[in-house]
Amino acid sequence: MDRSEVLDIIKKNVQRLSVFDTEEYQYIPLHQKSSPSILAVREIMDLLRKVIFPGFFGSEHEAQSESIQYYTGVNLEKIYDLLHKQVCNSLCFDSEKCCETDNLASGITVAFINDIPRIKHFLSTDVKAILDGDPAVNSVSEIIFSYPAIRAILHQRVAHALYNLEVPVLPRIITEIAHSETGIDIHPGAQIGKYFSIDHGTGVVIGQTTIIGDHVRLYQGVTLGARNFTYDDNGLPMDVPRHPIIEDGVVIYSNSSILGRITIGKNSIIGGNIWLTHDVPPNSKILQSRAVFDK
Amino acid sequence: MDRSEVLDIIKKNVQRLSVFDTEEYQYIPLHQKSSPSILAVREIMDLLRKVIFPGFFGSEHEAQSESIQYYTGVNLEKIYDLLHKQVCNSLCFDSEKCCETDNLASGITVAFINDIPRIKHFLSTDVKAILDGDPAVNSVSEIIFSYPAIRAILHQRVAHALYNLEVPVLPRIITEIAHSETGIDIHPGAQIGKYFSIDHGTGVVIGQTTIIGDHVRLYQGVTLGARNFTYDDNGLPMDVPRHPIIEDGVVIYSNSSILGRITIGKNSIIGGNIWLTHDVPPNSKILQSRAVFDK
Amino acid sequence: MDRSEVLDIIKKNVQRLSVFDTEEYQYIPLHQKSSPSILAVREIMDLLRKVIFPGFFGSEHEAQSESIQYYTGVNLEKIYDLLHKQVCNSLCFDSEKCCETDNLASGITVAFINDIPRIKHFLSTDVKAILDGDPAVNSVSEIIFSYPAIRAILHQRVAHALYNLEVPVLPRIITEIAHSETGIDIHPGAQIGKYFSIDHGTGVVIGQTTIIGDHVRLYQGVTLGARNFTYDDNGLPMDVPRHPIIEDGVVIYSNSSILGRITIGKNSIIGGNIWLTHDVPPNSKILQSRAVFDK
Amino acid sequence: MDRSEVLDIIKKNVQRLSVFDTEEYQYIPLHQKSSPSILAVREIMDLLRKVIFPGFFGSEHEAQSESIQYYTGVNLEKIYDLLHKQVCNSLCFDSEKCCETDNLASGITVAFINDIPRIKHFLSTDVKAILDGDPAVNSVSEIIFSYPAIRAILHQRVAHALYNLEVPVLPRIITEIAHSETGIDIHPGAQIGKYFSIDHGTGVVIGQTTIIGDHVRLYQGVTLGARNFTYDDNGLPMDVPRHPIIEDGVVIYSNSSILGRITIGKNSIIGGNIWLTHDVPPNSKILQSRAVFDK
Amino acid sequence: MDRSEVLDIIKKNVQRLSVFDTEEYQYIPLHQKSSPSILAVREIMDLLRKVIFPGFFGSEHEAQSESIQYYTGVNLEKIYDLLHKQVCNSLCFDSEKCCETDNLASGITVAFINDIPRIKHFLSTDVKAILDGDPAVNSVSEIIFSYPAIRAILHQRVAHALYNLEVPVLPRIITEIAHSETGIDIHPGAQIGKYFSIDHGTGVVIGQTTIIGDHVRLYQGVTLGARNFTYDDNGLPMDVPRHPIIEDGVVIYSNSSILGRITIGKNSIIGGNIWLTHDVPPNSKILQSRAVFDK
Amino acid sequence: MDRSEVLDIIKKNVQRLSVFDTEEYQYIPLHQKSSPSILAVREIMDLLRKVIFPGFFGSEHEAQSESIQYYTGVNLEKIYDLLHKQVCNSLCFDSEKCCETDNLASGITVAFINDIPRIKHFLSTDVKAILDGDPAVNSVSEIIFSYPAIRAILHQRVAHALYNLEVPVLPRIITEIAHSETGIDIHPGAQIGKYFSIDHGTGVVIGQTTIIGDHVRLYQGVTLGARNFTYDDNGLPMDVPRHPIIEDGVVIYSNSSILGRITIGKNSIIGGNIWLTHDVPPNSKILQSRAVFDK
């Protein structure tokens, strides 16, 4: 097949793919606005990691007490500039208020900057929670440097702060980056207390309206999900509270699913591979029925 | 230990590792052909995303109706060139027909280019299906831009088109890239209808001979797998239909396993954490037995 | 908000974030040592892949029998240099013996280099095991080139060798890279025999003290985990044998959890979605109870 | 010297270098505006080369008559966007009209886009002039692809177009890039006719108010410079016509200097190593006095 | 100016620039063949530098006598592959023999590989010549590592070897890279003996048919050029011997021009700023007339 | 030619090129020490440009008076670390004192850091000198941002500081980078006063023992060189004062050569294309003899 035949076929398909008012592609709009930049979001998250865990992810000198302020100053200003731009892009991404975004975005970004010390405090408690729960761990440093749970929780805590500031799209991008890297999928809307830990983590799903207390620990494959949807008049599922409330001190073992707006009472222990759709009183201990031998 | 001692040890191991006719490494052949390039495959997929979802992943100007044809033209030609090379490499990768690949490859690549509008149409219906099923979603744009399911399905639909054109290895590479990024593992051979959606997705496995109808929705951790293998005379497992048929309108909740060449009838609902190895009639609703309290 | 207001807020937060003797961040130390480099570890693993699977991941010429020694020589020396540096950084990362690391590190690195042929031999058997167990596979080359299980097992076998050489942190980094890319989370401490295979793999978790025999096959979502922790006098969980022993020839199907220091006897088959916390004699076959119809 | 002593010294120098109202550094202002981006200017020039010499600097397919329009379309739009931004930055770089730049910049950029075909026409004549004058040349393609004179003249013709549109700074940046790469230093203000050629070129200097006719050829080391400056009341040199007028058909051999607002008449030949500061009538032939033997 | 007006103007110019059969651009052909890759040529030259000056430009370990062969082996094979491709592209670049290039190219490339030891020998003598002539030099290592003359001569000696093998275009590209970096412009055709040195170098021009003996030294700004051209029947300049012959032991000081097919006899010294167009007997000493005082 | 023939030839040449005790390559030693890194030197120079000209070469925010200290702090610490390493490498590069370099290097690097404010002060005067001498200039900002003379002088002033601290090789590398980019070749040893300016600059050469006063201006192609060498007993040229002394206020026009340890008296003007080898009293004005007409 010679080149000009190939080019003919390309031309024909260019025509077929450049049509936008056709039923064939009706749910794929012609997107004519700036999209947020995944690359920039990754850079923001890297800078936040450096600011929150000083010395771990940059050069060793960045953590000298004499020079730490220089690095933190430069990094915070970079975070401000990068984040401000991404907040702008996100506000425009699929709304009509695009024109007023610049002011709005700088207010939001400043509010976020003011929230970083609190996020750092929460992460400090998460590090402690992991330390207390994993016999294979050797040190606080190893947790901070190499545990996927720390990355997933950092991303969610940052995304949640932006979610509360009503930034669209961006929080989801932030949690999806962690989801892709760790297999842990926590919605930015989920409210999570202090001393939170996840072990292994792959397959964990935590839904948008979930509320989690302090000192909660999850294992791999745990779903905190919705059971039923409420539909609106257009037949679309409604965004109402539909995920569980997990009270302080609860532990949920691997691959269990807790579904619906139910409450798991304080200090309960939920075994592995459990499918749970009703409330559980405090201090409960729930285990699976035995497997059947079929030898 | 000084450098020349180190180099001695390196030399000795160079000898040990440069032997190829030994039983010790008998299943690791000396591979002397071009391998497909993962990097090139990633680039092809990025270009396809730009062509299929215009404006989302390039600059905003690429989606102006006045200039969209320029971009689509350039991108399609790049896709042609990159894909043609990778199809060649794949045909050579582990066969003897390597010599005739150039013509064969250009026929295959042109056939694929002609298939892109259909793939785009199918993805348009997938976007709609996700929109209808997720109360947390804000817009079609957010789905296209940030949902891992879209990436996983795009990769599978592209891989499936190449699988049908009998390209070896390459389809698998394409789905493995999505598997790595999303935790969703769909074999290129699986046949999937329109309006397909997956929520969360980590841990989903869909086997090679699976057949899925229209309007099917899956949740995280669902396996559509094989139950038993049939072995050939050499004791190797045979490649026969061995995965389920999921009819139109079926929903399967998280972490359930549907195994073997069974049929799940139209509009059935399969609850979470189910282990299912037999046919199910249309409109069935299957739930797990309750968990046992052990308080 | 004008720039100097923004800078004021940045300054204030620089102050708040540059405090290190506060309870607020007490579990986030000021890290003042070199950290291992993730980038360098990735490069080491890429070089090891080239050395162990010659011709697959470099250019085709790297596998000519006439020139293979040049490439292996250069790659082994690069591995030595990169690894030596990372072993140094790891020894310093959170210990006090930092000063003696250089000699120690070169001894460790040389020992590792001497172990590469054994690792290659083990991987050769793993390739064979995958070939024998997957009806969808087309060739040994496809397995080596595109199966995530090969990547996960390669990383664990390398990490385990370093773990046995008592290198801190680094082994964990190596397995976490594979965990992130494949969803397969195998602790560096796990002892794994020959002919090991994992199918699909997402969600697999294998704990630190697990012992796995030869010819074992696992499917996606399998957990080989701990059941209870033993706590020391400080209330911290102790690092004692607490994960299962899986004997030769065992197959464990998808999403099952085997927990605690129990033994699964030779050639047993464990079905999917099983929750197992007790010993199982050789040649057992364990299946789940049937799902309940609720039509 | 330990780290904290080093940091002390750094701190002291940070103080000394962060002072801006001091006589010590009085000619180095605190620059608080965006600077043009050298990187972006390089990218603009690369795109212009592709548009003007289609097929030479991109892939071979960019020059297929069937697809050339796609590439030209995409490249022109990229040139527009990149150049618009750099024109904005340049207008702000050292003026007070920064606020009105956006509109102004888009007018300027559009005017430049409209001028590209004329620039291409002029370069076409330059290629011809080089072909006619160099016995070592093999083809038009070799000239376009590898002659430094083409790069230097392309940069100057582009810079001159922007200079005429009154863009500050940017034209100079464009010619300095060529100066650095070729050793040919032509001021953006110089007016240059068609069929212009330079051989070898290193050391050529052509001043701001120079006027060059058609069919002029220069050799390496030729200076077309100023002789005397006129000073204004502040003692600063004035920007008045002060460089030579070189009429049609003139050839100037290597290392000669033509200085001052003098006129070299049509078809004159100026030998090498000449120092010339007065008018020359048409058809003159000027040679150096002989070297002196001192054997 | 809104976007669609801009796009209109772009469209109009796309039309104007996509015309190829017009007198306006008659000397700019539509180039429809592969061009050589500047990037690949740079890589080839970097590898040749490593092979010829082992240990200077790679890591220090590349020069251990125990491992040098690995590095040389890998580098020579890379040189072969990269150069073979560039020779192919060059043979096609502007000729009709493109179809037979593959065989031709591999013969040429092998011949070049065989010539590398000779090139290394010549460069060894050049290093010695620089050492003997520069009072500011500290060591042989400093010359090899940082003197621009070494780079310019290396490029010319490599280009000359390819020029003798009748490779088009590529030799010129190689010398132009050195010209751009050093300001030294030596035509690939020039024949240069051993122990050749250039001091400072900027502005040196050496023409295509120049013949230079052993132990010749040049200073910055020296031109060894043509004086008159001989024209063929089409009025194009003919490629005949037209540059000087510089015999053994000659020194030419800065900014002098030696023009035409003249001979500078053995061991002559030519002073600076000389313009010379006639033969000079051996052992001559030529100086400029004194400058005139005009005080 | 098939691959194994090619590999045979490569092997043979690997042998020929891996010999080091042969007369053939006697001036190319086997270099077994670390070389300085050109890349690192470029980075150091970029950081110094940012520190000395704040706001011009980084982002605009780096020059806010509120945040400038953060950036200067971070940049100075990076300069320290990078330079310290390069000083080490340079001390080892060709000497035997390699073992004591670490302490020596940190003392040198600290001394250099302390010298940066002085270098900045000198450059401030150079900017002023260019401003006063070029009628085409528009602003101080344009000079700092785009004039090659500023780059060449910055590099020389930095190199000279390191030269005075007796760092080998590194100063030469720094000036050669500027030489390559600007065509201006100033030896690190040259002593240069304040308010120094060069116009255009290509071809300027300033030798090692040159002494230049304040307010000196040079034009392109000027050589301040040696005339005769003094040879030592081994026949090697000696490093004695052999370049001119240029007193305050001297102007030297294009392409003139001032050679030997002569003195050009205060405020003298040397015309273009002059060849000067004797002292000149203050306030002299020297012009070339007229060109000869040969019409």
Image (spheres, coloured by chain):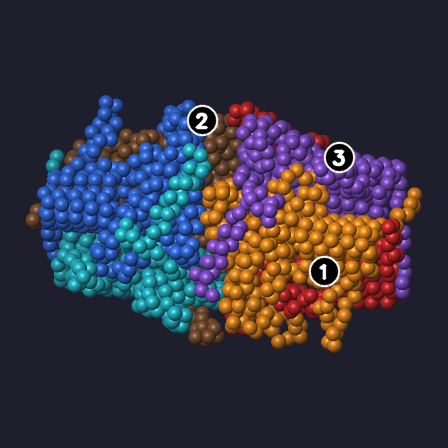
Chain colours: A cyan, B blue, C brown, D orange, E purple, F red
Host chain of mark 2: B
Determine the chain carrying the residue at label 3. E
Residue tagged by mark 1? D210
Q: Is residue E80 above or below residue E11?
A: above
- Amino acid type, mark 2: Val
A16 or E268: nearer the viewer: A16
Front residue of E291/B53: it is B53
| Mark 1 residue type | Thr
Q: Residues within 10 Å of mark 1 (few under 14, many from 20)?
A: many
Q: CA distance from mark 1 to mark 3?
A: 35 Å
The Cα atoms of the two marked residues, 2 and 1, are separated by 72 Å
Q: Chain of mark 1?
A: D
Q: Nearer the viewer, mark 2 or mark 1?
A: 1
Q: Position of residue C32 (x, y in %)?
A: 47, 59
Q: Which residue is mark 2?
A: B19
The kind of secondary structure element at disc 3 is: loop
Tag 3 and tag 2 share a subunit: no
> Position of D64 compared to B50: left or right?
right
User: Which element type, helix, strand or loop, lies under badge 1?
Assistant: loop
Q: Secondary structure at mark 2?
A: loop
Q: Which residue is mark 3?
A: E240
Q: Nearer the viewer, residue B221 or D139?
A: D139
CB of mark 3 within 8 Å of CB of mark 2? Answer: no
Question: What amino acid is at disc 3?
Answer: Val
Tags 2 and 1 both on a single chain:
no
Task: For marks 3 and 2, give the CA distance.
Answer: 58 Å
